[in-house]
Amino acid sequence: MSRPRLDEVFSRSPRMVGRRIGDEYVLVPLAGRGADLDSILNLNRVAAFVWEQLDGPRTGTALVDALVGRFEVERERAEADILELLETLLAVKAVVPAGER
Amino acid sequence: MVESKTRGFLRELAASGALPSLPDGLAASALAEAAREQGMSGLLLAAAERERPGWAEPLLGPLGAERRLLLVRTLAQIGLAARVLRILGSCGVRGLPLKGAVLAETVYDVESDRPMSDVDILALERFKEALAALRDAGFADVTRGDHAWVFRDPEGAGIVELHRSVVSAPGLFRLDPEGLWARSRAGRGQLPRRPSPEDLLLQLALHAAFQHGLVLSLVQWLDFRRLLEREPVDAGQLLALAVAARAEAPLAAALLAAEAVVEAPIPGPLRLSLARGLRRWLAPRLAFPLAFVAPADPPVVRARWALLSGRRTELLWRTLVQPETPDGDERLPARMAFAFWRALRLARGERSVLVLPSAHDLGDPPPLAPGTAPPEVPFGEELLRDCLGSFPHVRLTVTGRCMEPALRHGEKVHLVGAARRPPRVGDIVLARQKDGLRLHRLVWGPPLARARGAWRTRADRGLLLDPPLAAADVLASVDAVEGRPGARARRTGRALLSLATAFAARLRLGATRVEAVP
């Protein structure tokens, strides 16, 4: 799998849902067989924010813009964080490149 | 007393959304256990996280882990409902989800706040084709009633009840498939469609009042409140639907009970006047709302009699004359003949052993191809409890030889839920033991022991008594053994002898141990 680029467009996978429960934000795959706790992903505050931004197709750059606008973080650092997060989410099929839904 | 304290606490939580103060003598762990049983653990946790009382701190970890599990499970169940609807749709049968799956996705903050034991789907047409479609998709029969057939999902996401009617005695409350479909709307998550809020509320009321005699878990009562608060229910339209379905009495009674239990806000036009008999039956219960909360005994027969004032002949007819015989014969003479013999057997105090003749066994999965993993049926006990509550009998295959000759390995038995027929000494009961569910004989219990005291069971071929049980651990008793119509399931004399020999064996073992000590 090639590494994500900021000019690519991404969207949430329809097979993954995010839920805020109490103090945590979790992603749960919908295609599992019964209850499999190992399949749950915990998102930290920044990752949960990015996930919520993905309520429609977004470019990596748009996600960086949103991150910089919301948190006190330098753009260069935000770009690196977004790419790393997208790579993780792509690996677990939580997000997909737009057009692959 | 502690039991009603816990339910009282949880009822207040459901009504107010805030944590009441913890009553003296009530352990937090007992509260968590009761919350699980009432489907309220997610709501208890949410309130505890908000308010952070000291007594709740030890509960946060375990309840948090449970909430994650419930979230995964409930999402999988809703996914299962969506899959069943797609299967039905692919053969041209329109279907709608009922109750829990819709509510979890619609009126609760997060799906884990509305746990359910199975998913219910209403087939709006061509029920036989709907059954065939599920079987073709690999779903296995579990059991069936006159209004719904129960299937196990081949992919392990749980159990599906495929309904042809919202409640038992199909036809008693008119179903309007075209209207239901026309009023339905797009789902909000995985479900492609959901019933209108008015239809959903009417279905909840019928389920509560007619199917369960106005005894539900707290979360099921909370459904009423959430639906009325969070969905735009058109009271006028709901009333018109209730009139068309001839379901005004169940609607009115269920709303009054929901108001008593969880302070559900009843719209003015839905405060209907009740028939005198129903009013007289309901009034004392409304003054003691815990009478509406499981595990209170559900007075199903009495409730149906009171609800169907003026239509009791039809009630009897539709209860006895089912849509088809167990052999699938839909002709009226065959159905009437079956109803006659069934009524005769009931009048004689016998139980019909023909209720589930073609159903496969609960917990008896279809043969697997070599090398394939068995399908997971999670939460088996919960499912079993649900089936025992909803169906007159549940069929089970005996495994093991510890109850021979009373029950032989491989035989099929019919179980009756403890709420329908309270177990008595001498019965072979299905009880929750440390190592799982076991069919053993009740050797100490009612009428000799108090209902709240410790009960004892023993395998007929076992040496010692099983560990003490609470009444709630006894799920059901054996009513009949298939193929042996004369077999007597209850043997009081045998139970008392068994108790005595177990004590004697214990004394002997005790003596041996004493002798062995140097």
Image (tube, rainbow, N blue to C red):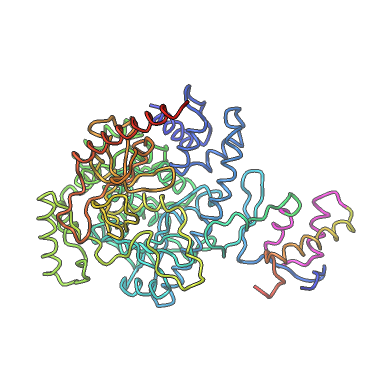
Front residue (pair B348, B218): B348
Quarter of the image where one finds residue B319: bottom left
* Whether residue A64 is situated above or below residue B64 in the rendered picture: below
Front residue (pair B119, B12): B119
Front residue (pair A66, A41): A41
> Where is residue B150 drawn, in percent x and y?
35, 62
Left or right relative to A97: residue B12:
left
> Where is residue B246 drawn, in percent x and y?
25, 55
* Whether residue B214 is situated above or below residue A75 in the rendered picture: above
Which residue is located at x 79 percent, y 63 percent? A62
Q: Quadrant of the N terminus of chain B?
A: top left
Q: Residue furthest top?
A: B24
The segment highlighted magenta reads A48-73
Which residue is located at x 33 percent, y 75 percent? B129
How many marks are shown on the rendered structure? Answer: 0
Main SS class of the magenta portion in the image? helix
* Whether residue B72 is situated above or below residue B371 in the rendered picture: above
Does the magenta-highlighted stretch encompass residue B238?
A: no
Front residue (pair B449, B302): B449
**One can see residue B244 in this view:** no
Q: Residue furthest bottom?
A: B91
> Where is residue B283 drawn, in percent x and y?
26, 34
Left or right relative to B355: residue B87:
right
* Whether residue B53 is situated above or below residue B160 in the rendered picture: above
Does the magenta-highlighted stretch encompass residue A69?
A: yes
